[in-house]
Structure formats: structure tokens, C-alpha cells
Amino acid sequence: MSAEEKAELLRRFQPCLRYDSLEAYFADSAELWTLNPGNRLRGKDGTTIASVGDRLTLDFLRPGEYPDGTEVAPSDVVEAGNEDYSRQYLELRRDNPHLRNVIYGHVAETPKGAWLQYWLFYFLNDYQLAWGAGVHEGDWEMVQYKLRPDRSEPETAVYAQHDFCQVKPWSEVRRLAEEKEEEGIAAEPGDGDRPLVYVGRGSHASYFTAGYHPTDFYDYCDGKRRPRSARLEIVEQPPGWFEWPGHWGGSRAGGKGPTGPCAHAQWKAPERLIATAYQGEEEGAEPDAPRIWVRRRRNRLLLEFDFSPMPEPPKRLIATINSSDEPEIAPRAFRFALRSVVLGTLQTRIELEPAKNYDVSVAVIDEQDRPTAAEVFILAPSTGLLGLRRRITSGFGRLVHLIRLAFGGS
């Protein structure tokens, strides 16, 4: 297959990523990790080989030997300098718009057929958005599609999920044209070829459908957060950093970061990923969403909640804040430990500028570590006469809400 044919197929069947409303980290260029101030390449003996601003770039990473002559070891890591991941990511994405929303496409040809592979890099695996643990720096994920022998279209889809994967025939894969039809939007040529990938909240595992997924872990994705179409970077011959055997992330946040694409068996042998196919069915009832209300009070985020209908109070409340007036800024995620609290009001220090629109997504992680669906609240600007009217309406609504709580109503 020629390079032009491979590129045409990769573009034709490029997946559309659908994120959860609470998601705060998206598939971007891996270059963000070697641009982040404070990041360093650390060798097996703990010494710093290179750092951002001092030789560390994507091109510095390679198998065998680094440009300075240092021997490469599989235990080498590129790690962050501190744990303020949200701030680092916000600033990197704001200052490097050309590195946002990137998918790496590769065609793997084997004696058993050709596969379209799409590799995704995330700055942070923040699984505390959907579970109680599992945070680590850097995150490599992937989906792949086996082509029919005549290469007219895929015949099989494989989506990687944690230590397992899911497999479906191409005919059962949800696509962009179907989504548009359901939403009353006219489909464009080619939309029927674009598969949808539902990205697990925080974990970035890939799913065929939206909703609650109790597989080997608990994942949730409502598919409502949709960044602009991702830019496809085609990898014909892998660059050195694709083959670097080290880890994309240190252990500061918990577990060590993952290895890159070429260190995974499916890079050369795509069929091997199918051996990890999840054999069970997605079982277990989705946990009930709690009663949560979001308001803007004195230009700060106010959360009100009533967990009394739940069998047990949740372990954690999650809120992700986004502003349509700041398209260059990624959503910000916040976690609040409320394990022993059933009913109350939480006045936070999270500032909401009065002249801006916000959408605030909230959910909880229950006592069994299961994530609930996100509920999205829209907060309009609170300035001028319109803002005054909204504050009066909000105040009246809050009074009604408190009365309902007092009498046990909904």
C-alpha cells in the first residue's frame, strides 16, 4: 500500500472523539510533555539527563542512545516538576493552540491484513474524576480498525480500555452520520465513515457508546463535550520519540506514566490486542445521580447538595468549570471530599468573573467508587440590569429550594 493510499484511508476513517461533560484533559500533541516548564528526563540512577529549556525536546527522545551519548534505558522517565497539573495544562494549551486536539494515525500491515491505528496522548490520566484512584502523568490510548481484504472499509473495530479492550464488527460501530441524524443535523459527505469514540471520564479509555461502563473499572462518558475536530498527524515511519522505550510520566501523582506507541505489542502485531478482549458483560446498575445545585454567589462558585436519597453519602463531589467566553482555556476540574456530609451548602473560593458565561458540570463518586452521570448548569453573566434580575430570580429559587429541603421534597 502506498503512502498516499494509507493517508487517504486514515483521513477517511478518522474517529471523532466524544468526551464527558466533566473531562478536563484532551487528546493533544505529545510535544506538550516536552514543552512543559519544569519537566525533566530522569535516568535510571535518578540523575537529570535533560530538562525543558536544556535540550529536552521530542527529538531528544529516541531508542539506543540520546544525542549527548547517554545510554537509553526502559526505566527512564520524563516527569513533571510539580503536582499543579491543572495550571500547567491550562497554560500550555493556552500558549500553544497549534498543539491542541491531535490524533496520530498509523497503518500497520501484517500477513493477516491491514489495520488503521489511531494513537492518542493525554497530559494527565485524572481517573479521580470517575473513581477513587488511578492518577498518573501522561497517558497513551488507542483504537484500531481492521480493513477488509479489498480495503473498501473496516470490518472490525478494537477499542483499548485499561488492561482490556472491546471488539465490535464495523457494522455495529456508531458513526458521525448517525449522531447528526439523531440531533436533526444534516450529514455531510464522509460522515458515514467517521466512527465515534466515547472517551472515559478522566481515564480516557475508549468506548463504543455513551453512558456508564462497569467493565474492569468504572467509567462514564456522556459524550457531550466535543472540542473542534482533531488534527490528524500521519505517522508513516515512526520518529525516534515514538520508539523511545521510557515512560511518559513519573510517579509523583501515583503510578508511573505509560510507555509510548512502539513499546506496545499491537504496534507491529495489531491482532495481539484482541487477545485482551473483555469477556464479561457490562453489568451493574448505574448509580442514582444525587441532588446538586450550582449557583454564582458573590462571583464565586456555590454548590448546594442533598445526598439524603442515596443509600450512603458519596465519597467525593466533582465539578468541572468551563467558559464559552474563554475558548483558549481548557475546563478546570475540582474535587471536594464530602464523605460524611448529607445535606449542605459549599461556598468555594473558585472565582467566576461576573461578565462571563459558564457551564458547570457536577457529579459524585459513590461509596462503591462508582461515578454518577454529570449534570450541567449554565451560569449567565451577572452584570447589569439583566444580571440583577437573574440574581433576584436565583435568590427566589434558592428560597424555594430551601423550603423544599425542609419539608423533604424534591
Image (cartoon, rainbow, N blue to C red):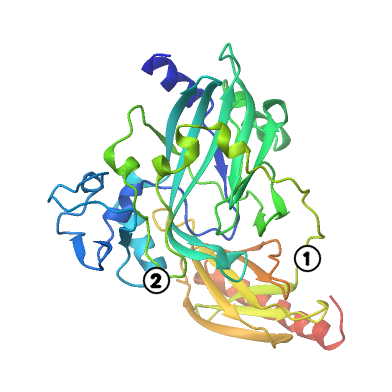
Place of residue 184 in the rendered image (x, y in percent of width and height, measured from the top left):
70, 34
Instruction: Assign the N terminus to one quadrant of the image.
Output: top left
Residue ID for mark 2: 252
Residue 178 x %, y %:
69, 31
What residue is shown with label 1?
A: 287
Q: Residue at x 69, y 88 (%)?
A: 340
Q: Amino acid at mark 2?
A: Arg
SS under mark 2: loop
Crowding around mark 2 (Cα neighbors within 10 Å: few <14, some 14 to 19, many 20+) is some
Identified by mark 1, the residue type is: Pro
**Along the line of sight, which residue is nearer the eye, 363 or 150?**
150
Of badges 1 and 2, the one in the foreground is 2
Q: Earlier in the sequence, mark 1 or mark 2?
A: 2
- The relative height of residue 5 versus residue 310 in the rendered view (above or below) is above
Mark 1–mark 2 contact, CB under 8 Å? no
Q: Report x, y in % for residue 6.
A: 43, 20
Examine the rendered structure and indicate whether residue 355 appears above or below residue 33: below
Q: Residue at x 71, y 52 (%)?
A: 211
Residue at 47% in and 52% down: 26
